Amino acid sequence: MTLPRPRLPLRLLGLSLALPATHSLAQDSITLAPVQVSEAYSEGYQAREAAVGGFQPAPLLDTPASIAVFSEQLLADRQVRTLSEVLQSDASVGESYAPIGYYENFNVRGFELNAASSYRINGQTIAGEQNVALENKQQVELLKGLSGLQSGVSEPGGLINYVTKRAQDVRSVTVSSNEQGERYIATDLGGWFGSERQFGLRTNLAHEDIRSYVDHADGKRDFASLAFDWQINPDAVLQLDAEYQQREQRSVPGYQLLGGNSLPHGIDPHDRLAYQHWANPVTIDSLNLGGRFEYRFSDNWTGSLSASRSKVVIDDYSSFAWGCYGAPSCAESSVPNYFSPQGDYDIYDFRSPDDTRRIDEAQALLNGRFELAGLGHELTVGSSAQRRTLDQRPTFNQFIGSGNIYQPTPALEPFDGSPGHSERRLDSRQYGVFVSDRITFNEQWQTQLGARVVRLDERAFDEAGNDRRHTRQYELLPNAALIYKPRADISLYTSYSKGLSAGSAAPWFAQNNQDILAPTTSQQIELGIKRDWQRLSLSAALFQLRQAYQYSQPDGAGHFTYVQQGQQKNIGLELGASGWLTSNLQINASAAAIRARVKNSGTADYEDHQALNVPNLRAAVQADYSLPIPGLALLGGARYSASKYANQAGTVEVGSYAVFDLGSRYSTKVGGYDTVLRLMVDNVFDKRYWRDAGEYLGDGYLFQGAPRTARVSASVSF
């Protein structure tokens, strides 16, 4: 048989290189019988290692952090297209302004992620203002909690890392559709070539005619990626990745509280607020480039160099629903930043073309193993540099008329004008030096000590290009963990970490609008236990997170100032299980209980209750059950959320909900080719619920969950 060239980590290359030599010595006296491989073993939903918890892939059991991994099979079975569909499988995650047709954001452990620092591809930072394509992703990794040691400036909630597919002998085509008539096709092609099969390529292409369940919210998407592997010699490996995506889709505005104190009722999830025929889809062009060179100096020492560029350009010409100033009923409301009590809202002509965000990053690493004073050491030292820029045009958001959530939207004329010229709004440079050492005392006890020194040099500018802030800051970000393994398959740990987060931008209605606040620090303490039991991985983690509170502080006279004052402290418990419960049933399950409180903010109404958009309990499960019929499996899922507050004062809450999904997978042969057919029906009982009650740029929005939706796909391997 012909075997594909394996992509091995350098630490395993010594073993792989020894095999040909052994065979050469024995080939004259031993003839091996042919071997036929009928089926490759798959872990399914269970993952054994991830890279997001450190600087290189490491066993999850030995990583002192709470990490969720969404495997390739789970992504395929769920037929996911966006990150929100992936992360709904984890109870620690909630959506935080994730509208249809726009880029998404999330909160993890009750803290919002930051598009500028919380998203990575193969460990390299990307601009998060994009919906990253999943066609070329092997798995998606979620580090819950602080990641200051790994990434420097980052949010306390967590870090998401996309792992791309590497070279492999594969040729497959997938087609898909949904009940709205969506048309989707994707190809996955790869292989090894060269005189010694030292070159590997993998390319993924996809086209999607997006058909949304929301009226007037259709679009299209084109995606292409290329992964290149070069085994230069037994000690050197080069990997290159490039992916480009253009996505066009009309964005769907969120609802707002009626009069600031009640929820809209009787809302049809198919309706789109503020629709105008002349408004264009939001277009997001994204380019992500990455390269990594790894060299093995000896059996114990390796080094690597990596560099990346991520660029996103957003063209947004939308008709947007916000607040209530223009309709007669608006005068009756004392909170004009919400819809009126009667459901009236204002419609704006919003334009933001050429919104350009770019991140360039480089990193050098040295990894080594050695013994000193009778103790084993696994040492990582390195340095990194990053530049992030933001170029935008002046705000163009013009009132053109009003509508009502219970009535058809009136046809209005666009505003007569155009946005100004693009200006540099932010230039942020980050430099870091870091070290991490895992010290092994004996078979039971280990400690991991690390720290990163961050130098941040950041300039923020106003719409005219004038300096608004210049921050120069050095920060030491320590990380320490103690690990106890009473047996090989059980790990208990406790850890402490410190992080540095970018400051948020003041909303337009604040007295200091457009100001980008200075960075703020955060701290975390975590206790956890993990166990690998047969083919099932179990975990539990107890954490406490603290960060400075950033919000629009009211002065009692109808004015606001965006400030950093007080502290938000979240305490929580997370439980997780992934893998095979029986020989026929595998699951990916999680639960999270979080207590999120604000203290010393200077605004009493915002304190002593659960924080905005953070339920005190969530749970989620995905299951795969193999039926007695060969190749046929039943897929199912459920997710639950307790109620959560929809305003900072904690006077309005959206109700709890439970949503159930059901589907199937059938593996067979069609025309002699391996074929997999999948059907998934989400929200089987057509539950109505508010999935997202978060804030964006200082304003609160409400987004409904999707109604019952169905998707079918077929994948053929050639």
Image (cartoon, grey):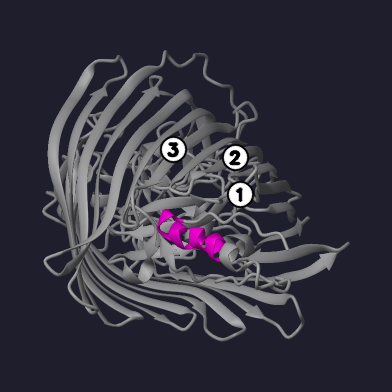
Say whether residue 84 is left or right of residue 668.
left
Q: In terms of sequence position, does the residue under pointer 1 or pointer 3 come before the other?
A: 1
Mark number, residue 135: 1
Q: How far apart are the two marked residues, 2 and 1, measured between alpha carbons?
A: 9 Å
- Element class at badge 3: strand
Mark number, residue 322: 3
Q: In front here: 200 or 404?
A: 200
Q: How far apart are the two marked residues, 1 and 3, measured between alpha carbons?
A: 35 Å
- Element class at badge 2: strand
Q: Is residue 19 magenta?
A: yes
Say which amino acid is labelled 2: Ser
In this rendering, the count of numbered labels is 3
Say which amino acid is labelled 3: Trp
Q: Is residue 241 positioned above or below 85 on the image?
A: above
Q: In terms of sequence position, does the residue under pointer 2 or pointer 3 come before the other?
A: 2
- Element class at badge 1: loop
Callout 2 touching callout 1 (CB < 8 Å): yes
Say which amino acid is labelled 1: Glu
User: Which residue appears at 72% of the width and 74% of the height?
Assistant: 33
